[in-house]
Amino acid sequence: MGRVKLLFIDLDDTLLGREGTISPVNRAALAAAMAEGICVTLATGRMFRSMRPYAEELGLPASSPLIAYNGALARTLAGVTLWHEPLSSRTARRLLSFLAGRDLTVHLFLHDRLYVKEIDERVRLYTANARVEAEPVGDLDGFLADGTPTKLLALGEPVLLQALRAELTAAFAGEVELTFSRPHYLEMMAPGGSKAAALLKLAARLGIKREETMAIGDGPNDLAMLLAAGIGVAVGNAPAEILARAPYITAPC
């Protein structure tokens, strides 16, 4: 195995502690990695605007690629878009129709802004954690028109979302990438919108071999990334099903 040249690290419950902050120990570790010439990349389901402050806090170079929306968007800290793979308008509108009438709160992410039907408690909790604003627009389908959103997110009870994932898998085969970032967050991106795909794509762009990559994460949306990386590391607070399959395990966040 070659020396690590590219480090992918998840934000929530991995780099960020329970209080949503970066510890001095983690900050020092990443500074040491960058001093060794390692390309440090944050990879998250969050919006670009939500993750950017953490990259700035870490002092990442302006050219550092940041992976947002579970891999559907890669953009440098300076704002240069490396790739953007949104949902098609047709698929997004079909998804909105499919989700309508259920006990869910749907988030629509378009042009790195968050749109919702209305502000409810789920929206308030999400925006407080992500430190972003949500814009209520009423009918999401009418608002979207021919737009191509980067991601849709359904918030609801975990049991309901597990059943919904099975329905969506059958109804949208080959059209949608589905993953859970948290038990009550079901994420919907275009095919290939995953952290694992982003890791391999970015490594190829940088001329870095797969075995020279490392990924650290905790959630279901991180598992494929951990398995794709040369060194895949789960933090100790990850769910049991992630710990059981992760190649390596480290201390909790």
Image (cartoon, helix red, strand yellow):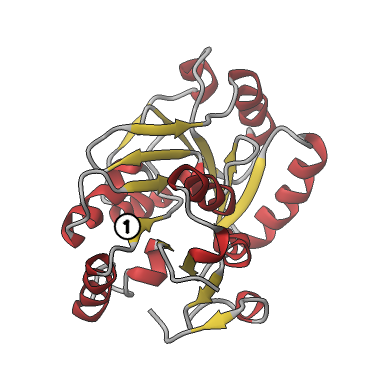
| Residue located at (58% from left, 77% from top) | 239
| Residue located at (66% from left, 27% from top) | 97
Q: Position of residue 84 (x, y in %)?
A: 47, 31
Which residue occupies the extreme top position in the image? 146
- Look at the image and tell me in which quarter the C terminus lies: bottom left
Q: Position of residue 125 (x, y in %)?
A: 36, 55
The residue that label 1 is drawn on is 129
Q: Is residue 174 visible?
A: yes
Q: How many marks?
A: 1
Please, is residue 165 above or below residue 36 in the view? Answer: above
Q: Nearer the viewer, residue 14 or 204?
A: 204
- Describe residue 95's horizontal placement relative to residue 168 as left or right: left
- Describe residue 97's horizontal placement relative to residue 36 as left or right: right
* Residue kind at label 1, given as amino acid type: Asn
Q: Position of residue 230 (x, y in %)?
A: 56, 68
Please, is residue 24 above or below residue 166 in the view? Answer: below
Please, is residue 201 above or below residue 27 in the view? Answer: above
- Describe residue 153's horizontal placement relative to residue 179 as left or right: left
Which residue occupies the extreme bottom position in the image? 251
- Look at the image and tell me in which quarter the N terminus lies: bottom right
Q: Position of residue 77 (x, y in %)?
A: 25, 43
Q: Is residue 115 visible?
A: no
| Residue located at (47% from left, 42% from top) | 205
Quadrant in the rendering for residue 190: top right
Kind of element beneath mark 1: helix
Q: Residues within 10 Å of mark 1 (few under 14, many from 20)?
A: few
Which residue occupies the extreme right position in the image? 170
Q: Nearer the viewer, residue 221 or 80?
A: 80
